[in-house]
Image (cartoon, rainbow, N blue to C red):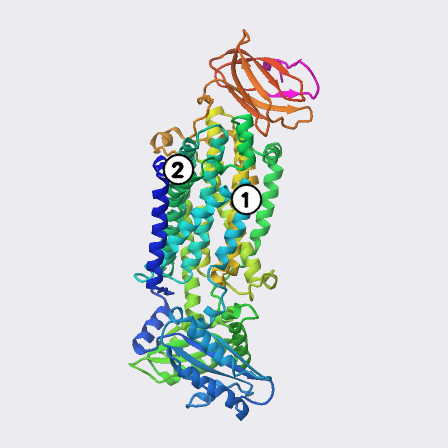
Amino acid sequence: MARWCYRHRLPVLLLWLGALVGVGAAASAGGTNYANVFSLPDTDSKTAYDLMEQAFPKAAGDTDTVVWKVDHGSVRDASVRSRIEPALAEIAGMTGVGAVSGPYSGPRGAAQISRDGSIAYAQLTFTERANAVPKQLVQHVVDTARGAERPGLTVELGGQAITRIQQPPAGLSETVGVAAAAVVLFLAFGSLFAMLLPIAVAVFGVGIGLFSTQLISHVTDVPDIAPLLASLIGLGVGIDYALFIVTRHRRGILRGLDPEESAVAALNTSGRAVLFAGGTVCIALAGMLVTNLRFLDGVVIGTSLTVVLSVLAAVTLLPALLGLLGPRVLSRRQRRRLAERGPEDETASSLAARWSGTVQKRPRSIAALAVVVMAALALPVLSLRLGATDQGNDDASTTTRKAYDLLAEGFGPGFNGPLQVVAVAGDMPTLVKDLQGTHGVARVAALPPAHGVTVIQVVPTTSPQSEETDRLIDTLRDRVIPKAGATAHVGGVTAVSKDFASVTGERLPYFIATIVGLGFLLLLIAFRSLVVPLTAAVMNLIAAASSFGVLVAVYQWGWGLDLLGLGKAGPIQAFLPIIMLSLLFGLSMDYQVFLVSRMHEEWVHTGDNARAVRVGLAETSRVINSAALIMVCVFLAFVLSGNSGAAMAGVGLAAAVALDAFVLRTALVPAVMHLLGRANWWLPARLERRLPHLAVEPREEQPQQAPRPGASAVHGFVRDTEGDPVQGAAVTLLSKGGRQLERVLSLADGSYILPVPAPGTYLVAATAPSYGSRAGHVVVEDGPLVYDVELVAGEVDAVNQPAADRP
């Protein structure tokens, strides 16, 4: 398939362009129909909601609030009314506004004025839900209401529809994230064309995915946060997957392969790994379905679809783009050097090689330091409290936050989250009296019954997000209502949020067990080891705990919220643990596969665990860190989205990816694997025979054949007298008669490997510019032989001791 896409690059590109334009046009014509459906079967708040829906079927549309305050006098003054009443009348006459209930008319109007007379509010009901209300109408409402302001009279507005117009322009967070990723890619590749390839793949995958999600919202319930989360994860994985493939393709061209053959080889190796990685992300996302929360179904559909399209773009569109660029995927300097010096291997960077050697020398110290760092960051998770954010968590400069604070000031903290006690049987006067006498209740108002259902509004004395309000809900359900002998249920937004958090907390262990178990099985099959997948599972749990610790410190404790402009501290969104864990386990699996597959390949070739871990880390850490840095930039950019859930997910995932890549995969995982030694690759023989074989990333064909497992080989390091690696040293294997059998160059960490045709006695010679030559006889038996070489600067023709004589 890769070869076909490479050779038919123009038709492939046109097909993708046509799909993007076609799906985009259909989505634009159909519009959106997102719906936040919190279906919580067998919960008290869901029962209350169903009863209210039956009794008051016309209570539809979004209800928003206009709040005003006077610095002096009263809102009842004629000078205030003469400015507010015309504005409310104009709003009531707008097409799309169903009704406006103000404080200056009607029997209940007086209740909409605070006791001191300084604050009042009016409720306006749109004819549509918040997401369907045109932004032009909302902006007109806001402008009209704010136009009534004068010195000493402040007007603010709150509600879901109002929130839409104070959000940043659509696509701002995505644009910032892509721009930051472009900078990282340019620094990594040094080529403008190579930089554009991953971005183009991500744009096509995410674009079609978002348009498709928009169309799907017309046939099933998709929450409004789904497209934001889909673009967040889609941009991250789309750019990263293309980065892995382009990196392998560039390496093939540098080794002298024809661009077409290099692209085919890259797709046959890294492309297979991308398919595996994308599949693991989708499996992790699908794990959300075990929670049986309908709200998450739309999130699974949107994010999984975007990931699948990003993978398809990486394995079909990318080879077509590689065909269009040809050798220009390399930088000018690389193309010039390739023409002058000929093919060469792309080796690990000196920094990565030195770090890999340091981990091998001090695994206990590095592992202990990494564990201390992760444990310290995970400590705040002990204070984790799930709930729901509201407009009280908005930035202090927004009109919704100001309206929220004004209502709390004038009518009490609980006014922004009243409870609804929905009763169908019992002594209503007694129930109302008992509710009024309950500690923590500020006001109680019973509405006229309809269809045998009575709704009693209960305003708590505490804010909707406080723990005291949660305890009040439990008190009403467990003591007050049963004592009154009534059949009633506690509902309202605050009760729904509490029930949603409780249900999520109860089902979270099953969800974690599902995704950890699936990840363990996949890695078990891929790497034929029990320890590797077990280590990965433990590391994923550590990363999750630490990232949630960061999230609690920032959003729940408020550390840095003002600096980042993220609003006011509050509980963690109840749905966030499930979404974050799904994405985190999927992304962590990607990095684990990329790192350990290279280690596994080296282990199969040499049977030397220390070398396998060292070489695997040295050769993959740069790509892993570059990919992680891109994801961190993309995720943090979603702080600018204006959506509290997406911003919270962005911060949490950015912290999770940074800790996973820079601490776990770069330090703790290789350190632990050094300490475990050969046990890393242990698998019971009975299990080995029964497991299916899965090639995550088949080894790319090398110009020089590597030794087979158990075959004879000589490998080791070339270092100077200070112990530093010597890169580019020529290491040659000669027969007893002096005939050259093999010749390789040492890598950035000084390592080399020479395949040996058969057991016997050979001569190994090493030389490098500015160093003297070294040569020594080695006796090779069955299996690999470790032989390190030390070169001395300026020394000539120094002969190394035979391997058999070395300690």
- Name the spot of residue 414 as percent of width and height, x first: 50, 76
The nearer-to-camera label among 1 and 2 is 1
Quadrant position of residue 294:
bottom left
Residue under the image location 52 percent in, 41 percent down: 624
Residue 638 sits above or below residue 541 on the image: below
Which residue in the rendered view is the most extreme toward the right?
794
Which stretch appears magenta? 788-807
Q: CA distance from mark 1 to mark 2?
A: 25 Å
- Label 2 sits on a secondary structure element that is helix
Residue found at x 54% / y 57%:
551
Q: Compare residues 702 and 800 and report the one nearer the observer.
A: 702
Which residue position is annotated with label 1?
186
Q: In which quadrant is the N terminus drawn?
A: top left
Label 1 crowd (10 A; few <14 / some 14-19 / many >=20): some
As drawn, the residue found furthest toward the top would be: 737
Q: Is residue 138 among the parts visible in the rendering?
A: yes
Dominant secondary structure (helix, strand or loop) of the stretch shown in magenta: loop
Magenta segment: does it hold 36?
A: no
> Compared with residue 282, is residue 367 higher up or lower down, i.e. above or below?
above
Residue to which mark 2 is pinned: 272
